[in-house]
Image (cartoon, grey):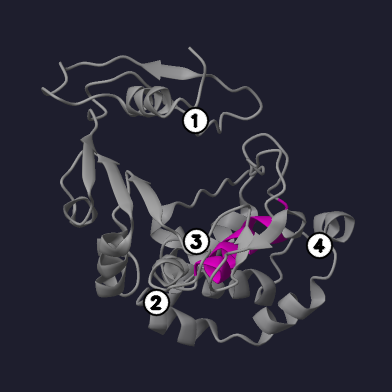
Amino acid sequence: LLTAMAATIVQEGLRDENWMAAHVEGADAVLDVLRHASVTEHCERAGVAEETVRTAARKIAQARSVAVFEDLGVQMNRHSTLVSFVQRLLWVMTGNFGRAGTNYLPNGIGNIGKGNMQGKSPVTGSPLVAGLVPCNVIAEEILTDHPGRFRAMIVEAANPVHSLADSQSFTRAMRALDVSVVIDVAMSETARAADYVLPACSQYEKAEATFFNFEFPENYFHLRHPVLEPLLGTLPEAEIHARLARALGAVPS
C-alpha cells in the first residue's frame, strides 16, 4: 500500500523536487525503483482500490503540511524495517519535514548503532547490539555445558515462553537455569516455568509516568496517580527491585 502511494507520487510528478535537491542525497536508486513499480499491482496486493490510493497520495503531496505516525502494527509485523522506510519516503519526497505541522525525528541522544556493538554473547557469539542479547538465542545461551552459559534470569513484563521462537526450547531453558524470577501482573506461561513469581501491581494500582515524550519541541512529564487499591501481596515494580537490591546487599543502607 505504501509503495503504491510512493510510486504514485513519483510517477505523477508530485515530488517536492526543490526540497529534495536541498536536503536529500542518494535518492536516485530509490526513485528509479518507484518509477517502475506497478501501482495497479501493488494496490491489488494490498486490497485497496487504486483510485483511493492515488487520491490519498495526491492529497499528501498537495497538502500544506502532513505528519505521519506509525506504531506497533507496523513495527512488530513482517518486513517492518522496509515498511518504515517506505512510510518515511512519503513525507520526505513531499518535503514534509521540520516545519510546523510536519514530521520530525523523536530520537533520543544515544548511539545504538555501530559504535555500540560492544562484545558478543558467551555461547553463540552473537553481537550485543546496544548491549542487548538477541532474544532468540537466549535458549541456546542456557542449554549448554559452556562455562560462560547464562545461569540465572529475571524476566519482567514479558512472556518469552509464549512469544519467542521455539517455545519448547525456551521452556526447557527456563527450567535448566539455576534460578529464574518473573515479575509480572499476570501468571503467564513464562511465570509458570519460573522458580519465583513476584506479582506486580497493575497500572491502575500504582503511580506511573509517560516516557514517550513526543510533544516536540516542548516535553512534559506526565505523572498518573493510582486510582485503585493494590491487590493483596502485590507491589510496584520499583519497590520489588528496591527490596531485591537491599536483600542482595547491592546498595548501602
Which mark is first along the chain, 1 or 4? 4
Give the spatial CA distance, label 1 vs label 3.
32 Å
Which mark is first along the chain, 4 or 2? 4
For label 3, the residue is 56
For label 1, the residue is 211
Q: Nearer the viewer, mark 1 or mark 3?
A: 1
- Residue at 21% x, 50% y is 191
Q: Amino acid at mark 1?
A: Phe
Q: Amino acid at mark 3?
A: Ala
Which label was assigned to residue 46? 2
Q: Secondary structure at mark 1?
A: loop
Q: Amino acid at mark 2?
A: Ala
Residue 171, percent from left and from top: 25, 66
Q: Is 41 left or right of 31, judged from the image as shown?
A: left
Span highlighted in magenta in the image:
80-95
In the picture, residue 193 is in which quadrant?
Answer: bottom left
Q: Label 3 crowding class (10 Å Cα cut-off): few <14, some 14-19, many 20+? A: some
